[in-house]
Amino acid sequence: MVNVSIIVTCLEEQSQLRRLLPQLLSQQYEGEFEVIVVDQKHDKDLEEWLEETERDYPHLSHTFCPASVRGIDIRKLALTLGAKAANYEWLVCLSAGEGWESDDWLTRLTACCGDGIDVVIGKTSRRRLWKRPSFNFFRRSVSLFKPTSSIILCRRSTLLLGQNVKLSNCKIVKL
C-alpha cells in the first residue's frame, strides 16, 4: 500500500463537501492517508466548519487560495497549494462535487501505483454531485490541471512540474 494525500478542491460546492468529507474520512484503506481541502473562495463559514471537523479527524487539514489571484488559473493554484501541503508522494485530486458508492475505491485506485506509472485515472459510473468537469485528455497526453474524468491519482513531483503526462505513463481504473 502506498501512502496518499487526497486533495479536495472546493469552489462553490460547500454543501457537496459536507457530504463528501465523511465518505473520505471513513474510507477503508490499509495505508496512511490524509485529506487536504483547498477552498478556492476562502469562505469564512466553510473555514469554521473545517476547523471544527479537524478536531475530530487529525488526518484532515485545509488551506485556501488568496482572494486576489490576477492572471492565475484558480484550479491550478488550488491543486498546487494542496500538493505543497501534502505529506505523501501520491496525490488523489478531486473536486468537492465528486461522489461514489464504494468504500474501497482508494484501495482499488492505488493498486495500480508502481514503477513507470505517473498517473492513475479513476472512472466512476456514478453521477456527479456537481456538474463541473475535473480534467481533460489532450491527444496523447493528460493535463492534470484541466481534467474531465472523475478522480486522478498522480505523483506529487509530476503535478508540481506542471507538464502534460503521456498516456503511456497512465493507467485507467474503473471504480
Image (spheres, grey):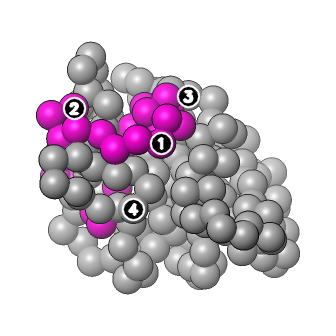
What residue sits right under mark 1 in the picture? 162
Q: Depth check: 78 or 110 in front? A: 78
Secondary structure under the numbered disc 3 in the rendered image: loop
Labels 1, 2: front one: 1
Query: From the viewer's perspective, is residue 165 above or below residue 21?
Result: above
Instruction: Name the kind of residue labelled 3 in the image.
Output: Tyr
Q: What's drawn in magenta, residue-wise?
A: 148-175
| CB atoms of marks 3 and 2 within 8 Å | no
Q: Is residue 116 left or right of residue 85?
A: left
The tally of labels here is 4
What residue sits right under mark 4 in the picture? 146
| CB atoms of marks 3 and 4 within 8 Å | no
State the quadrant of the C terminus: bottom left
Q: Depth check: 167 or 96 in front? A: 167
Disc with the residue nearer the chain's start (3 vs 4):
3
Disc with the residue nearer the chain's start (3 vs 2):
3
Q: Is 152 in the magenta? A: yes
Residue 97: mark? none
Query: From the viewer's perspective, is residue 46 above or below residue 15?
Result: above
Secondary structure under the numbered disc 1 in the rendered image: loop
Instruction: Name the kind of residue labelled 4 in the image.
Output: Lys
State the quadrant of the N terminus: top left
Query: From the viewer's perspective, is residue 67 above or below residue 147?
Result: below
What residue sits right under mark 3 in the picture? 88
| CB atoms of marks 1 and 2 within 8 Å | no
What residue sits right under mark 2 in the picture? 169
Q: Depth check: 139 or 155 in front? A: 139
Q: Quadrant of residue 171?
A: top left
Q: Quadrant of residue 69?
A: bottom right
Labels 3, 1: front one: 1
Q: CA distance from mark 1 to mark 2?
A: 15 Å
